[in-house]
Image: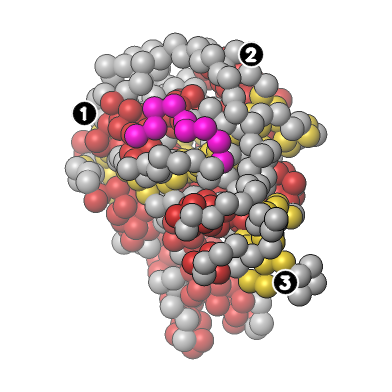
Amino acid sequence: MPRLPKLEYDRGTLTLHPPPRGKDWLDFATWDDRIEKFRIPAYHYRSLVKTLNQAPTEFIDASQTFTPLDLQASFSLTPYLHQTEALTAWKQGNRQGVVVLPTAAGKTYLAQLAIESTPRSTLILVPTLDLMHQWYEQLTKAFPGAEVGLLGGGSRDRTPILVATYHSAAIHAETLGNQYALQIFDECHHLPSDFFRVIAEYSLAPYRLGLTATPERSDGKDKDLDWLIGKIVYDQTPDNLSGTALAEFQSIQIPVELTELEQKAYEQAIATRNQFLRDQHISLGSLQGWQYFVSASCRSPEGRRAMLAHRQAKDISAGTTGKLRTLSELIQKHYPDKILIFTNDNATVYRISQDFLIPALTHQTPVKERHRILESFRHGKYHILVTSHVLNEGVDVPAAKVAIILSGTGSSREYIQRLGRILRKGNSPNKLAILYELVAKNTNEEYTSERRRSPLQRQSKPTRVLPRTEIGNRAAEAKKPWGEKPEEEL
């Protein structure tokens, strides 16, 4: 009796031998002379199995390591409409795809609903250790009795539900790839990087869920999410959820004038930089252009002067005295409301911290001190915090109602993350949240501000521009060769 074709997992790939009947499966396979078997990338597992079943072809499956879960969910919250819609859209997408929801819209709870409706061994990927511990705590509460483990920060568990950092999972991708039927990628815009993408490439997981507020990447690799996880199946903006799942908010842009001396110094610095860019035929309108500028600035004294001038111009527009004066007025207007102040550099953070006696948080802040400051902010001992980038992502920030952006990058992700810090309803669900954006007039900050806000404007109301004088006043298959049909399969 002839042997059945056998699919086997081999350190991030699949091997198939002896070859099955038909030819369609050859679209996924290449012949490996070293082992005299056909080899298939692991992420093609679901499509390959579907093709073999359509033949139909009998074969020995490679999914025997997938563990069914007996989950007793203990959810204390009723899903919002957008969470139910997102879950349904993901199921209709054959349980593969990316859900785009703003910060504070309940992506973690959506993931718990996905785990409950797809009770299979699950790997959750997160970008930071803080998030890893937050997910662990929430999953142990949502699924009491379930084996939940950690991979990262010194932990090396192998449990049916595993929360791992992207970095640790990438290191162990070859051994994790055949263990988990469901992969959930929190902040999935990190996945397409050259180091992290192996987590998805080496995995057999037939079910994949990506969660992010902004899938776009400056290097364009966000398009790879279409095959690493699946296409976007659901997308919501902060404006669409304002007043329901999120606090109602208003975005106010305040133009700030440079002083005469600041304007003169800014224009001289920009002229020095632009002359070098013209001489080198470099345009800063793209990431590649910026990389050319950085590379060219290291090769000559003129290049170094141009880079220093570029930094000087940014420092002038970011820390103009007009912004600090406006900041003082905004603090007086909103105190004692909880206020978060964001800048693009640590120097300005420390300057504001010293001048206004406000606790500062940067990447240099020790972990224990950061925890103490955030707890004091949560309980009302501190009403104001100033930070650069450390609170953008991966930190559980207590609810605040006012955010003030003194400076930032052109990244829409950063802007949405900062906005999300004031969108939790918190203890004052009916109070309007306000995001102030201070922009230096007649500088590149005006273009930077427009660029970071443009993705939000696809479905959003326009940002209000406040004059200086008004400051005070987002059909499933029936046969599932990787296990029994998940509950609630559509």
Q: Is residue 8 left or right of residue 422?
A: right
Q: Is residue 487 magenta?
A: yes
> Crowding near pointer 2: few (<14 within 10 Å), some, many (20+)?
few
Secondary structure category for the residue under label 3: strand
Specify the amino acid type for callout 2: Gly
Q: At x 44% / y 22%, what residue is drawn? A: 399
Identify the mark at residue 32; answer none if there is no mark.
3
For the residues labelled 2 and 3, the Cα–Cα distance comes to: 44 Å
In the image, is residue 7 part of the stretch drawn in magenta? Answer: no
Task: Determine if residue 332 is in view.
Answer: no
Which range is magenta? 482-490
Pair 2/1: label in front: 2
Q: Nearer the viewer, residue 369 or 483?
A: 483
x, y percent for residue 384: 48, 25
* Residue assigned mark 2: 145
Question: Residue 274's spot in the image, x, y percent?
Answer: 44, 78
Earlier sequence position, callout 1 versus callout 3? 3
Label whose residue precedes the other's in the sequence (2 or 3): 3
**Amino acid at dot 3:** Asp
Q: Is residue 401 above or below residue 233?
A: above
Indicate which disc, 2 or 1, sits on the residue closer to the N terminus. 2
How crowded pointer 3 is (Cα within 10 Å; few <14, some 14-19, many 20+) is rated as: few
Q: Residue at x 75, y 46 (%)?
A: 175
